[in-house]
Image (cartoon, rainbow, N blue to C red):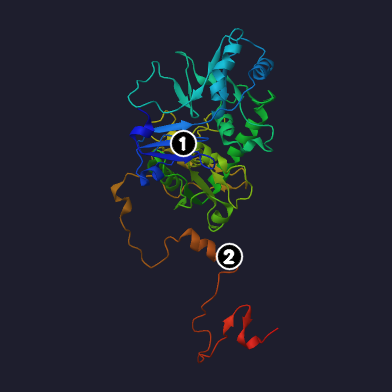
Amino acid sequence: MSWSESLDLSVTWGVNGCCVDVLGAEQAGAQALVHFGPACLSPPARPLPIAFVLGQRSVALELCAKAFEAQNPDPTAPVVLLSEPACAHALEALATLLRPRYLDLLVSSPALPLPVGSLNPDPEPLERFGRRFPLAPGRCLEEYGAFYVGGSEAISDPDLDPDLSRLLLGWAPGRPFSSCCPDTGRTQDEGARAWRLRARRHYLVERARDARVVGLLAGTLGVARHREALAHLRNLTQAAGKRSYVLALGRPTPAKLANFPEVDVFVLLACPLGALATQPSGSFFRPVLAPCELEAACNPAWPPPGLAPHLTHYADLLPGSPFHVPLPPPDSELWDTPDVSLITGDLRPPPAWKPSTDPGCSALTPRPQLELAESSPAASFLSSRSWQGLQPRLGQTPVTAAVTGRRGIAIAYEDEGSS
């Protein structure tokens, strides 16, 4: 029996959004959901049967095989075949053409949800970057280079592809990574682009370390563990002595974020593709970070650049993940390590607040005189501006009787006559 014969279906289209709209499906009372178009394949916040229709893009197998041989002359080098979701159907056929010569070839596949009631394969494949990797026992993904089939020569800026950016950021820095256009077989070494993306990540981490006020953008409500991730980021900023505001603005745009000039950096809590989609744009008044950059900036126990992996999904930062790094205890020397900003050259002060388990830390301390203990960042920002709006000037202006004001509309008041 097909889904349409037994269940109420809800259909979503993934042209502008890659996340499954489970909230819309709930409001429609649907019992199953069909998602068309690109998908990040993030686990939904609510259990719901989901079918993905990723599409099938034509792939020139012979051209791609020749391009692979040109990029990988060593037949013993370990290489993973990757692709955009619409080209995943052709990877096995491409591997069939290459396996007579290449001995250590691994084929990835989209991490689609398993059917209800099905058994997990044994051994269970590694799942990362929205894909499954059937690694042999004792092997790790960091040993492999990558050959990516996807993209288009018509794209003016390849950095705008969030799926490829996710792979370049998360792949092992020392391993080769090349891409191939599925239509023409034209290849490109992605090492320079990966270096450029990582350099921007390091810059954003420095901006987050210099920031005093952090805006947490709730960019998704349909991906699993988003509430836990939001609480983790708030505790992270508090431990680093920063103030944070949670903003629910929908899709972030420069016009929306410009309404909060007192915020130094924004952190977009979204799926892996959504968190990277806004990064290349230079029109934002303040930088927009991914949760991994905030973790590297606020957690002193996080490994230094070059040793820490770039995690594109916020769930990898939470407890239970093999990449989770807990905050150091309050008395750790890591909180007092001197730190110099690479942007301003100034010495950063130690965090003004540290996580504490002392039950008496919240007790009130009597003060000899009344003084302002803490002000909001918005009020501090307003006080530093040269123009602060209309001034009330209480007691400084004479009292006068009320008079009749102007009447009409702004384009033609009654006392202006006709022109």
- What is the three-letter code of the residue carrying label 1? His
* Left or right, 317 with reference to 170: left
Where is the C terminus found, in terms of image quarters?
Answer: bottom right
Spatial CA span between label 2 and label 1: 48 Å
Residue 408 x, y percent position in the rendering: 58, 82
The residue where tag 1 is placed is 35
**Badge number at residue 385:** 2
Q: Residue at x 49, y 58 (%)?
A: 377
Q: Are there few (<14), some (14-19), or many (20+) residues within 10 Å of tag 1?
A: many
What is the x, y in percent for residue 15?
54, 40
On the question of residue 136 being in view, the answer is yes
Q: Residues within 10 Å of mark 2 (few under 14, many from 20)?
A: few
Q: Is residue 395 above or below residue 233?
A: below
Image vertical order of residue 386 relative to residue 329, above or below: below
Residue 42 point in image, percent of width and height: 45, 34
Q: Give the image quarter of residue 24.
A: top left
User: Amino acid type of disc 2?
Assistant: Arg
